[in-house]
Amino acid sequence: MEMKESVTIPAARDTVWRSLNDPDVLRRCIPGCEELEQDSPTELAAKVTLKVGPIKARFAGEVALSEIVPPESYVLSGEGKGGVAGFARGSANVRLEEVSEAETVLHYDAKADVGGKIAQLGARMLDKTARKLAKSFFDEFAAVVTEANT
C-alpha cells in the first residue's frame, strides 16, 4: 500500500518541525493512540488501538527516525504488532516546504505492508482505512499546530 499526499499547515516551518518531533503533540494527533514514549531522540514506542473493518486490535510498536535534516525532512520507519489481528510495518519520507513565514506544506510519501487477519480484509478496505487515518492525523495535527501558534 502506498500513499503520497501534501498538507498545508498555517505555521512557520520551524514550528511544524518542532511539533512533528514533539511526542505530546503526536500523542494527541495519532488516531487511537493510548501511549507514546520517546525512548531516544530518534526512537519512539507506541500503543495504538485501531478498528479496520470488523477487526479491532491494540498494536504495540516502535518508530525510528533517520536521514534527519532539520527543519526540512526525515524518514520515519516502524512496525506494530497486533497479536492475532496481525502486523503493520512501513516507512514514510516526510518533507517540509516553507511557503511563507506563516505557511508550510508537509509532503509525505508512505509505504506500508500488513499481515495476518488484517491483510485478509483486502486492499481496497485497507487503503480506504489508511487514507482515513492519515487524514484524521493531519487534520488534528494542523489544528494543534495552529492553536499553539496563535
Image (tube, helix red, strand yellow):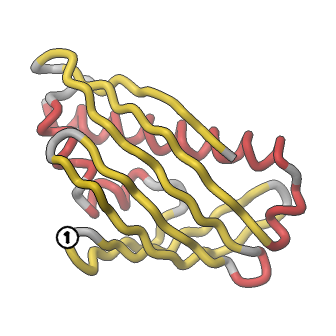
Q: Position of residue 130 (x, y in %)?
A: 65, 46
Q: Quadrant of residue 37?
A: bottom left
Q: Residue at x 15, y 42 (%)?
A: 71
Q: Nearer the viewer, residue 17 or 148?
A: 17
**Left or right: 150 with respect to 20?**
left
Q: Quadrant of residue 48?
A: bottom right
Q: Position of residue 129 (x, y in %)?
A: 70, 46
For the C terminus, the image quarter is top left
Residue, disc 1: 41
Badge 1 crowding class, 10 Å Cα cut-off, few under 14, some 14 to 19, many 20 or more, is few
Q: SS at mark 1?
A: loop
Q: Quadrant of residue 82?
A: bottom right
Q: Residue at x 60, y 68 (%)?
A: 49
Q: Position of residue 131 (x, y in %)?
A: 63, 39
**Left or right: 20 with respect to 85?**
left
Q: Position of residue 146 (x, y in %)?
A: 24, 32
Q: Residue at x 65, y 63 (%)?
A: 50
Is the residue 89 above or below the residue 11 in the image? Answer: below
The residue at the far front in this view is 67
Is the residue 79 above or below the residue 12 in the image? Answer: below
